[in-house]
Amino acid sequence: MRVIKVALLDDEQAQVTPEKVYMGEHRAARLEIGLPTRLQTGFDHYNLCFDVMGAGRRIPLGKFSETGTGELAGLAKMENGEIICELPESLTRCSYLRAQVEASREENGLCTRLEKSVPFAITFEASIVGEGGELSAQAPGDVPGGGQGPQGPQGPAGPQGPQGLKGDKGDKGDKGDKGDAGAAGPQGPKGDQGDPGDSGTGAGVCGSRRLSFNWYVQHPEGEYQRVPLNVNGPASGVGYGENSIIIQQAGTYLLGFSSTLAAPTAKDILSTYHIYVNGVVAAGMLRDQWVPATRRSNIAMTGIVNLQQGDVVTLMFRNNNYAQFTQYDTLLLPVNQTELNAVRIG
């Protein structure tokens, strides 16, 4: 097991040792993260978030606590004041990975405190030999009982010899390089959809949508409204519909979202986020959030859901105390602060 030591210091610096590990080592790389003093006490849960190659895709690993329980306690846990996390292969198949620790405290199901560590980066180096370490060998002269001794130093170069006879004509040379490609022809008709591939391990199957403008919700009703996630993130093995992610390969997925919600001028907000699958709320994928008047609040949630080919995943929003608002009050989801992610893990 290759161990990556990360020390999050009190001066908001991060030390990562070693600086490089090998790419694509499935469950062969483990993070051991030491927390700064400000994140060690006063929190119920921790959340470990990743951003693959700076693509703006935030992949929450899931909340876990000192007791080892949580949504993904099998991959990440607290041990002697450190976060221990075995990295899945899908997070090591890249040249670098940015990570950050979130610490949260909840009371009566509501988040009352949320703090984040300084971000840190892990670099992965391509290798055809995997995890292999340094090689060592015993010189023949060191073999017990004698044997060939060590090779002596190289002697001086001798004088240059006379020029030889002209050689025979050489063989025909290799074929030259291929010429530049011609102009592209017209695009042909779209072919039939292929059969679904094997389920495999799920590595590399992911997608995300985000909101690219300020979404003002005026005088909201009590019904759920679909969040207009209008910008596509990088995708592999999934498709995109209207403000939604469409599953193309059946399997076990890590679904999650993060958002920032701004309150109106003089009223508190109690709102609910839901992740829907095919128009129905996914089990356990509900989160309430209080936002004090004139303030902003961050909210995030992850969960594991079994999905089938063709399932449609959307993010829904509802204001629960809408009766207190007038037609002039406005809620705000700021630009680029709301995102929905789906990552296949099995």
Image (cartoon, helix red, strand yellow):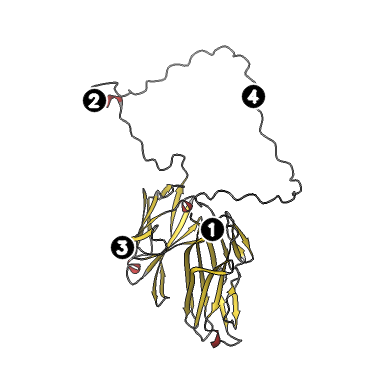
Q: Along the polypeptide, which appears first: circle 1 or circle 3?
A: 1
Residue carrying label 1: 55
Determine the secondary structure under disc 3.
loop
Residue carrying label 4: 173
Give yes or no for contact between labels 2 and 3 (Cβ–Cβ under 8 Å).
no
- Decide which of 209, 265 is in the foreground and name it: 209
Residue 228 in picture, x, y percent from top left: 61, 70
Give yes or no for contact between labels 1 and 3 (Cβ–Cβ under 8 Å).
no
Alpha carbons under labels 4 and 3: distance apart: 67 Å
Q: Along the polypeptide, which appears first: circle 4 or circle 1?
A: 1
Q: Residues within 10 Å of mark 2 (few under 14, many from 20)?
A: few
Residue carrying label 2: 144
Determine the secondary structure under disc 4.
loop
Residue 19 in picture, x, y percent from top left: 40, 50
Give left or right: position of 7 versus 338. left
- Nearer to us of marks 2 and 4 is 2
- Nearer to us of marks 4 and 1 is 1
Q: Residue at x 52, y 52 (%)?
A: 204
Give the amino acid type for the residue marked by disc 1 in the picture.
Ala
Determine the secondary structure under disc 2.
loop
Residue carrying label 3: 81
- Nearer to us of marks 4 and 3 is 3
The numbered disc on residue 296 is: none
Give the amino acid type for the residue marked by disc 2 in the picture.
Pro
Give yes or no for contact between labels 1 and 2 (Cβ–Cβ under 8 Å).
no
Alpha carbons under labels 2 and 4: distance apart: 53 Å
- From where the camera sits, is residue 337 visible? no
Give the amino acid type for the residue marked by disc 3 in the picture.
Gly
